[in-house]
Image (cartoon, helix red, strand yellow):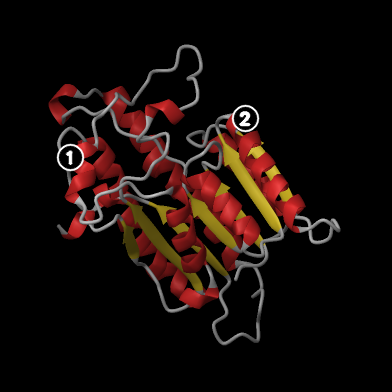
């Protein structure tokens, strides 16, 4: 379903980014660029991809080429370095998944401080915007991968937003605002990218069983790092959704793969909610 070169940010660990990376690797991608701030969890994702690749290709043919770079996505110098490496090593970018993000500080506006605001919005929105800028610059100047395909596209960008970019909840104004901003950016970028046959869409996950919702899955924080996430009882929130369960990272990854592909060639500027029905109830 997919072919060519793909970038996934926030690809480490056992969350959505890792699941997307593994799903893309199984869907025909030949070159993957993976990035995460945590080098250890990034290596975990790479090992899972390689293990699956070896299991499915015992003759060692059709191996996936992986460029893995760990760094802070909120640092524009790292983003500049990342995209320079993509240009040097691959010369094109067919799919970009802007997944890197953090949870909120679980505080109301009056109890939050400016440092909390800057940290959350710098990662969830500012860095995503800057990555989108770099992705569009590459995609606009590249040839079509399948020029004879009537559904051809120069590239596809998927921004990972949230159901909380559409609805609100208590003690989450900064997080909700950052994800609403991602949805607004997606719509506008889709309009501007359409003449170049580049598609820009967003996915709005609901409550997914990841390190963001289950503290037992989270890697140890680096010394001196402020913990933005306090333990939460999500039972009530999960039960708001008619399906009354958390989703899995793989369920999000499957939607991302479809929406990235030319099978979704007429989907543009959309924000697909994948939340077990949370936002309809």
Estimate the x, y position of residue 150 in percent, counting from the top left: 56, 87
Q: Provide the secondary structure element on which disc 1 rests.
A: helix
Q: Nearer the viewer, residue 52 or 118?
A: 52
Judged from this view, the residue extending furthest toward the right is 59
Per the image, the residue denoted by label 1 is: 236
Residue at label 2? 39
Which badge, 2 or 1, comes first in the chain's sequence? Answer: 2
Check contact, mark 2 vs mark 1: CB within 8 A.
Answer: no
Q: Between 118 and 39, which is closer to the camera in this rendering?
A: 39
Marks counted in the figure total 2
- Place of residue 277 in the rendered image (x, y in percent of width and height, measured from the top left): 24, 58
Q: Secondary structure at mark 2?
A: helix
Eyeballing the image, is 237 above or below 107? below
Instruction: Check the image and report above or below for 252 versus 227.
Output: below
Determine whether 157 is above or below 210 in the image. Answer: below
126 vs 255, nearest the viewer: 255
- The quarter in which the C terminus is drawn is bottom left
Task: Please tell me which residue is depicted at 51% across the width and 77% down the height of the picture.
Answer: 263
Rounded to the nearest angstrom, the CA distance separating label 2 from label 1 is: 34 Å
Q: Residue at x 19, y 46 (%)?
A: 239
The circle drawn on residue 268 is: none
**Residue lying at 24% horizontally and 22% vertically, measured from the top left:** 113
Whether residue 173 is visible:
yes
Judge left or right: residue 232 versus residue 100. Answer: left
Give the side of residue 243 with respect to residue 70, left or right: left
Quarter of the image where one finds residue 143: bottom right
């Amino acid at each position: 379903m997919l072919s060519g070169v793909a970038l996934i940010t926030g690809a480490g660990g056992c969350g959505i980014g890792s699941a997307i990376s593994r799903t893309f690797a199984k869907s025909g991608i030949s070159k993957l660029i993976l990035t995460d701030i945590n080098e250890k969890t990034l290596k975990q994702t790479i090992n899972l991809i390689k293990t699956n690749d070896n299991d499915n290709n015992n003759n060692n043919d059709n191996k996936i080429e992986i460029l893995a770079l760990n760094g802070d996505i909120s640092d524009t110098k790292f983003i500049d370095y990342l995209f320079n490496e993509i240009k040097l090593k691959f010369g094109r970018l067919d799919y970009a998944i802007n997944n890197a993000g953090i949870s909120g500080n679980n505080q109301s506006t009056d109890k939050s401080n400016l440092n909390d605001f800057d940290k959350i919005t710098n990662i969830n929105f500012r860095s995503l915007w800057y990555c989108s800028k770099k992705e569009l610059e590459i995609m606009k100047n590249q040839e079509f991968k399948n020029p004879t395909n009537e559904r051809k596209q120069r590239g596809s960008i998927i921004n990972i937003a949230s159901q909380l970019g559409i609805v609100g909840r208590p003690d989450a104004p900064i997080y909700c605002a950052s994800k609403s901003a991602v949805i607004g950016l997606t719509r506008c970028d889709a309009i501007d990218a359409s003449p170049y046959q580049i598609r820009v869409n967003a996915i709005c996950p609901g409550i997914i069983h990841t390190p963001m919702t289950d503290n037992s899955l989270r890697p140890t924080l680096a010394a001196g790092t402020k913990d933005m996430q306090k333990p939460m009882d999500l039972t009530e929130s999960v039960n708001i959704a008619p399906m009354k369960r958390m989703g899995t990272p793989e369920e999000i990854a499957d939607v991302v793969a479809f929406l990235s592909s030319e099978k979704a060639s007429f989907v543009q500027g959309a924000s697909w909610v994948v939340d077990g029905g949370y936002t309809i109830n």
